[in-house]
Image (cartoon, rainbow, N blue to C red):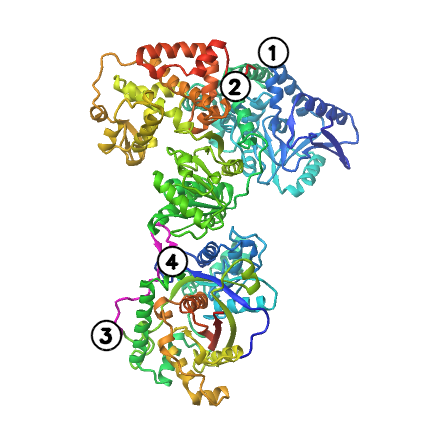
Amino acid sequence: MSAFTVERDGDVAVVVFDLPGEAVNKFSRAVKDEFRATMDALRSDPSAKGVVIISGKPENFIAGADIEEFVAAKSEDEFRTLSREGQKFLDELAAFPKTVVVAINGACMGGGLEISLACHYRIATSHPKTVLALPETQLGIIPGAGGCNRLPRLVGLRAALDMILSARNIRPDKALKMGLVDEVVHPAILRDVAIRAARAGRVPARLGRPAGLASWFLDGTGPGRAIVLRQARATTLKKSGGHYPALPAAIGVVEYSLARGLELGLVREADVFAGTAMTTVSRRLVEIFFATTALKKDPGVEPPAPAPKPVERLGILGAGFMGAGIAVTAADQAGVSVRMKDADLPRVAKGLKSVAGIIGESVKRRRFHRRDAIRKLALVSGGTDFAGFRRADLVIEAVFEDLEVKRAVLREIESVSPSTIFASNTSTIPIARIAEASKHPETVIGMHFFSPVHRMPLLEVIAAEKTSKDTVVTAVAFGRKMGKTVIVVRDRPGFFINRILSPYMNEAGHLLKEGARIEAIDAAMTAWGFPVGPVTLMDEVGLDVAVKAAGVMHDALGERLAPAISIDALVKSGRMGRKNGKGFFQYQGGKKGAPDEAVYGVLGITAQAAPPAEYDMVARLTLAMLNEAVRALDEGVIRQPRDGDIGAIYGFGYPPFRGGPFRTLDAMGAASAVSTLERLAAKHGPRFTPASMLADLAKRGGRFYPER
Amino acid sequence: MTEPAGRRVAIVGGCRTPFAKAGTVFRDVSAVEMARYAARELLVRTEIPPAEVDQVIWGQVIPSVLVPNVAREVSLLPQFPKTIPAYSLNRACASSGTAIADAFDQIRLGEADVILAGGVESLSDVPILHSRRFASILVEAGKAKSISQRLGALLKTRPKDLMPVTPAIAEPSTGESMGQSAEKMAKENHISREAQDAFALRSHQKAAAGTRDGRLTAEIAPYPVPPKFEIMEASDNGIRTDTSLEQLAKLRPVYDRKYGTVTAGNASPLTDGASAVLLMSEEKARSLGYEPIAYVRSYASAAVDPGWQLLMGPAWAVPRALDRAGLSLKEMGLLELHEAFAAQVLSNIQAFESKEFARKNLGRSEAVGQVNWDILNVMGGSIAIGHPFGATGGRIAITLANEMKRRDVQFGLISICAQGGMGFAMVLERR
């Protein structure tokens, strides 16, 4: 391997990092050894007065550490050694007797940023792909190559904690402002400016922390730091629910380093890095990372996969909240031209209004500039006729959830645009039933988005019996272009997400009926790691929608999904959930308030002497869902456990640190899951009968994923 | 009958925004937004593959100083590749007519196959200027090297320097406003107040009928109105369905309060709007599968001394365009005469019909021809529909072409008077 070449510009040595055979630069032990050898040679080279470190990749500096190497480590000792070795090399770099300037163009992540922190002078480009970040905590670990120590010394305590805990990307202008880099230049002059800086032996204008009295106190004094650290711990606990040990651990290392100095701080950093790397949380998060990466490359069909058809023009039927959400996401993320159609102009106007609102919100949050907003908005238009649909590559319908209505629009589209792909955004109607109205059902597919479309990261692509491979790969590729994580599911009732949510929400109904309080049910599940509990989820989905979905699932899957309570009674009492400000909870000005005590009365529930205990609620709610997930896998609704796990995490916030339903079952052990289910079935009825696939695994001692 | 030189040029589609009285529906919309909207909507309606467009030409009379070349902003719509050249032009009220004429020339000469031509005007968003003196003070202050120099420059400002300057619709060479010119023409050509009011009423009635039966609104792309986006405006808001001769008679003359006859009722209102027309060579239209609505047969422009009868240009331009088409006025199946003022249209018609005018001014023994009122402005005109200067030519071309198709009429005439004593005329043919 030769990842490093040294070029000369007079008395400056330019070290070019270009990992052979890879699209991006990654840092591994082998890379580090070669880098060290290169630097050792330059240390004693009298013709080199200064050194520039730059990437040979066009739009990437260093993407981070090599995760494959990271997961190969098995013991805490191995991880500690990995960290100590990296730290030692970066200590040498920091103590290098000649000026070392790092020239950053493209992503500078994790280990890449830690290298930069050890250099003497940092220059970044204004290129849109240039971002700097320490994403380690997203993998359940802490920065382990000096990041926890050098970052607070460079940018101050508050900014360092923010970067480490949020893992957020820092854009060049922000990086300059906070002192993370010393200069920002156009990419074309990066190398020249870096060489000049190395030759002149430039040093950062300031070090340590932002100017100002508040910063002097909060970043610079003991009492001030104590306040910052206390607040960071409190906020982190609240946000993470205590489920992510790397976050408080990172705070601890930063605190220790500032109190005890760099040398001891680095030792502590390596210890904590190794400790967090050994946690199951980290293992789960790394698995998710790999699964997500693999899913991004999955064409959605068994090989050989045809090439997806390019989608340049998108038609959307129905300019309601869903249709407008799909429209704006397609324009914003995929940059395609979108035409919406609805029955009358006021509805079209309403759709265009939501599009403008969502784009405007992004401008307000500075996600992009007003200029970009104008361009994105110009991509979306609407009307009451089929103008713009004739040459549409893909038409997505988001009309009223009714089979005959969907069939009617399908027929209309096929008469206007015979060659387009027709995708239905239905959540309850089998795609095959809709496709019966089609002259060429191979071009009919389901694209089930979640609301609000611009925020929810998951897309279920539903391949019906007759859907062609070409249609599937095109829908998958386009969904991905829309920025979605895409899973391909079979055309079975509820597809995957609603399939596993139905028994879960229904079980919440059983618990309510048995006297559990609304807030107690939700609290049990948020404590388990869900962002919201099942009762809140019903309010979010909309109670009218929940009733309809529950009915469909009951009809399709039988008595185990018999509704426990009459949500219909709530709907009839005027409670539609969050959307009309009245549901299980009360809402004021869009904010969720206390549970509505009147709900119990409407549902005919009387308080009972012994409501279910929390552990019992958790077992029942989770296993209702997990058991159904296994059935879905068995029926081929999802193609593999990976898709189910990623779907649940991105679809409704299944706790990432648990890795998804199938990872949870593997951690639990099939035998243990089955025995709990049998106990629950004996007590609460056959709805808890273990799925046959699960019972089978329990008998064989099998798992969903191979053991690592 | 002589055939025009070069390739045949087809109009394959056209549309426009609703036309709205200045300061109403499009109060918060800029000219560039309207232009892009009309163009984008035409792309959608015609389903033209955007990369087929070779050139974008746009007319605008009062451009924004911030967007001096509105055409380029149109050709930078995200649907287009970024490589389509574009220019804006100004022949006053004949601007988008001229944009279509330019497209016609370039296509028939083979310089382009497909051109998007159009026009726009926002009179809600006119540039308001600083006085010349204040502007030079600001320039001087901007060049100042020290704070004291800068202050010194700024201190020269006098209160009256701060009065903003609004562009007036007046002739720079004569100082006479449009309305004053119309008033003069009414007097010199003996056009009575009654005749003007009757003509205005006719314009409103025909435009109202065209709106009611959808012939006129077919060309309109409904516009979602900011900032609330609650309605999509789908018709022109200047058309009065309820006006009458009595009501029109009550209005006071604006330019000569004592003996004048030109009123707000028999003149076109200040209007916001945009129009867009897609033109291509006949072969290209055929290869892309379009059925042309009409073809451009000929056009002509003319100019008269602005100090004489400012809006009399059409009296020269029309016979010139007809000659170039090898056709006569009586062969026209539809006539679209731009209505800046009822007095102006009636004066133009008088000239067309006058043997003496033809002999004296055109060097021909016979009048240009009698105007058949049954085929004149059959859906009304600018008095009712409105007159966004830069967009009117495009609007008239679309209205005419669509109606020629509906009636299956072979020839149609466009006539537009313009500031500066100019006139513009174009002949369209159906097949």
Say if residue A364 shows up in the picture. Answer: no
Q: Quadrant of residue B375?
A: bottom left
Residues at marks 3 and 2, CA–CA distance in whole angstroms: 85 Å
**The C terminus of chain A, quarter of image:** top right
Q: How would you rate the neighbour count of disc 3 (Cα within 10 Å): few for under 14, some for 14-19, many for 20 or more?
A: few
Amino acid type for the residue under numbered disc 3: Glu
Number of numbered discs: 4
Q: How would you rate the neighbour count of disc 4 (Cα within 10 Å): few for under 14, some for 14-19, many for 20 or more?
A: many
Q: How would you rate the neighbour count of disc 1 (Cα within 10 Å): few for under 14, some for 14-19, many for 20 or more?
A: some
Main secondary structure type of the part rendered in magenta: loop
Q: Which residue is mark 3?
A: B246
Q: Earlier in the sequence, mark 2 or mark 1?
A: 1
Q: Quadrant of residue A621?
A: top left
Q: Say above or below: A74 vs A599.
A: above
- In the image, which residues are magenta? B222-248
Residues at marks 2 and 1, CA–CA distance in whole angstroms: 16 Å
Please, what secondary structure does the residue beneath circle 3 have? helix
Q: Which residue is mark 1?
A: A77
Residues at marks 3 and 1, CA–CA distance in whole angstroms: 100 Å
Q: Which residue is mark 2?
A: A282
Q: Is mark 3 in CB contact (under 8 Å) with mark 2?
A: no
Amino acid type for the residue under numbered disc 1: Asp
